[in-house]
Amino acid sequence: MRRISWLRQLATQLALALIGFFVLLPVWGIARLAFDGSLKGRPTEFRLTPKLWSFDAFLKVLDQPYQSVHFTVLLKNSLLISLGAALIAILLGVSLAYAFARFRFPGRQTGLFALLLTAVLPPVAFMTPLYIILGLMQIRTSLLALVITYAAFAMPFCIWNMRAAFQAVPKEMEEAAFLDGAGDLTTFLRITLPLALPSIAVAGLIAFLMAYSEFTLGWLFVDKADNVTLAMSIYAIVQTQYSGGAQPWSYLGSLAIIMSIPVVIIFLIFQRTLLERMMFGDAS
Amino acid sequence: MNPRLNLLLRLLLVAAVTLLAWSLRARAASLLSIDYDEDDYLRAGQQFAHLIKTSDWRGFLDTNYRPEHPPLAKIAYAIALLPLPEQPLIADVPITAQPASSLPEDQLHAARTEAALFGTLTAFLLALVNPLGGFMLAIHSFTIKYTSQVMLDGLASLLSLGTVLAYIQYKRKPSNGWMVASAILLGLAADTKFLHGTVGFAILLDWLYTQRSALADPKQRIRLLGKVLTWGLLSIAVFFAANPYLWPNPIARLQETLDAVRYTTTNPNVDSAGYPVWQQLAWLSMSVPWDQNHAFLFLADTLIAFLAVVGFSRMSKKESVFGVWLLLELVVLLVWRTKWPQYILIVTAPLALSAGEGLLTLWQPVVDGWRARKSAKVYAKTDTRRALPWLVPGLIAFALLTLIPLLFQIGISLTDFNATSIRDGFHGGLWRAISGGLTGQLPAQPFEVGVRANQVNFIGWNAYAPVFRYITSGPNGWSILFFNAMWMVLSVLLQCGLGLGVALLLWQRGVRLSKFWQALFILPWAIPELIGAQMWLNIFMTDWGWLALAAQKYGPTSFFAVVDQAVNHGTSLWLIVFLIPALWYGFPFMMLAASTGLKTIPQDVLDAAAIDGATPWQTFRSVIWPLLQPLLVPALIVRGIFAFNQFYLFQTFYFQDATLATLSYNVFNPNSGFGPNGGQFAVSAVINIIAVIILMVFVSLFNRWSKAGEGVTYA
């Protein structure tokens, strides 16, 4: 195939620019709000650029985005919950993933089906029973309840992906270790786990992101301002806006931008691997 | 099997289906209350009956009450009224009027019986083609409704099915007799109800398509076109011959008819109903939502629609005209501006047939699976023993976190647990109800919507049927399950189209800045769904959004105002407000999947195609697409499942009746800030379990398709 002609190059660039416009339009819409220092409440006139450039909104949400709770508390809650959920999902799931990857046993097919099914359920499907179970245990409103809830719906996904990671490790390497007299556990710890570690980390990352950006179950469970997360506080701002609250809309814009930046960086770095994990496969 | 026995069995089945169809229609005819239009057609029947009784044959030339519909079915009703004593003529009211409050009892009964007879005959004819298809039509509730009331669709669907069957006979063994029969029946079908006459176009398409080799040959072409033309002219001649109202002045009378038809699509009732473009598909996906007096014993239309989707390709392979017929009528229903549910009867016959084939399609894997079960695999004992230490701790965690909550959810769904009984529930009431019910100590209480007891009661499976009915055939013709399915298909198709298109653009050799563009396009995928939804809400929000503000600034005739008016105040275009964000979120994923696939295509394959002189489209169709499929199809299913579960987008826009997930959340939420329905814990559990069952189907599909994921079949 020849290189494309300049005319086709131009047409391609135009089409790509158009799609780029589509991609950036809503982002610009929210950024325009975030940097506008003139907003008292909702925007009242159509503008393409902020009326009064200012970083005030960023400073405000980096201080107290939700009621009188400090930003660092929200960030701490977000990180605690997301890291906790990811760690639980990975640590408690790892042995099951390995069993599915390496051994043949009765009920394996059914087990895999159950795993894949639970991995594609929406968070809402776990909401009803967990709300009630955690309520019965009287820990529903604590941060621990959120950790458990997010771990519950991240776990099937993590197990499925770790299974794929273990399967990708060549069986010959394990067998060689086995012949050298290493037991199952030693083989796993010395050979399989180190090789699969990068993929496991990515599965954990996805579990982290799930919890990081979840807000609806959060609002259902938590009732103390001290236990609110970043994602929840964004939704709180939205609700205040809907009910005609007096907050400038620039808060929403700046908080959304602050929250998105780390995630965007993670995605840009890991795009290929993330894609494979999210397709539930090990296409390579 | 003995062919005679086989035939006997088939005839018995046909007889059973016919009997079933008759009894269901007779039951509905006696139980249904008077509906829109029944007074009109009965009045028309009275007029014609009077003309016949008084032998006033000239009167036929000037009689056709409700000229938007041709007179044949009305004359047929007159015949049913003949043996009865004449009654005063039913009042002439505008077509926008409410249904009549009362009609002459004996005449209504006679006319409805006649309609039911036509409906039964249609099911009988279809059962001759395929007893299962006949069965589906026999129990289809919308078909029963409109063939047990004084409507035009009973006779019309009988005649249109007859047209197709005669054509099939002609197709199998070309004899002019069957061709003539098909043309006559087509003319009569059009004389009964115009919309049913569209079946002629389906036959035309199928005829030309199956004879396309003859079309290529100049000699045969003339012969073929001659035949088609004769058939068409004959049916038009029959149409005029059997429509005496047209005789005195065909042009003027046709004009009058067209004006009347136009009024049926533009009268104020059509606008005030506010049905979206896809409403007819929604009607097809649901059972009759207004089941007065339990007139229908089966409410299985949703299942029939699902089976019809499954069986479509099998039916079309067997006999292409049924497939063409089904698709063409669906297009007609989408395009036709008026969305009254009786119009779907133009498509229920092929739909039922397709559903019959769908049942057979599904049946085969079940049989295979059962056989495969018997030859269960033998597992090495050592392997199982080695697996145990790994399995046990993982299983305990998995069970505690995931399986037990899901099982407990089934338990909750068997109770009436809600926000009012939360005290009792948390103090042992829930356990008392579930265990008492499951051990048989407590009888199942009836389920009633909106009743909230202080104590938790065991209700067994009683909530499932009403909840399922609510999500499939909601009030005002809105079906959450249908919208959910349509949403899934539309959003995934759009995402796949744009994603694949961008991937192909970037894949061209020597595109400048391709790395930059790709990195930019990944952005929406990386932004959390909640924030992305927020960004689009900021644009589309009514009154306050960017678009609405632009409309205010640039005046009511500006581009922005036109768009704002269309998407925020129209009946169908509001869907775009959701599809655009969905496209924005989803296309990067498909782009990446397609790009990954494109990289695996070897250059020499493409060079070979170029040397052979393949056009870009041919290269795509026969080289690129087959190589992409293994990667794109799993990606499509993953995105499809994601779209089926779509929640944050709709929740951010406060659209509660969009998907099962949003409904479940808002039905559950005890501190629901919006809507009076929150706090119904048990009902939300029922919805979740229905969603899980549907997702099981998707996962089975995924397993079958996915090569990359290896799925359950990975050995």
Image: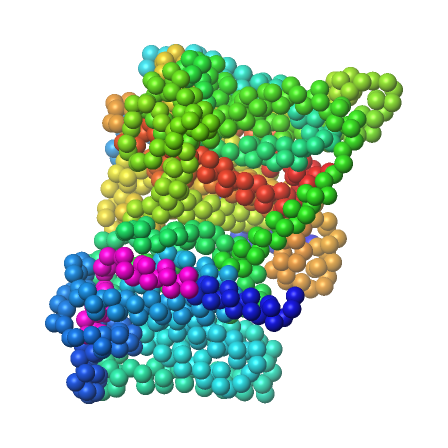
Q: In this image, B35 relative to A2: left or right?
A: left
Q: Which residue: 55% across, 49% down?
A: B501
Q: Residue at x 45, y 80 (%)?
A: B182
In the figure, residue B394 lies in which quadrant?
Answer: top right
Point out residue B94 in the picture as x, y percentages from the top left corner: 16, 65
Q: Is residue B271 above or below residue B420?
A: below
Give the prevailing secondary structure in the magenta stretch.
Answer: helix
**B49, A262: nearer the viewer:** B49
Which residue is pictured at 57% across the width and 81% down the height? Answer: B173
- Residue B33 among those drawn in magenta: yes
Does residue B256 appear left or right of residue A250 in this picture? Answer: left
The image position of residue B73, as x and y in percent, is 29, 74
Query: What's the magenta region?
Result: B19-46
- Pick out the residue farthest to the front: B441
* Residue A85 screen position, x and y as percent: 53, 19
Of the pair A235 and B557, the residue shown nearer to us:
A235
**Residue at 26% across, 77% down:** B79
Q: Is residue A156 above or below residue B59?
A: above
Image height of B250 relative to B414, above or below? below
Image quadrant of residue B533?
top left
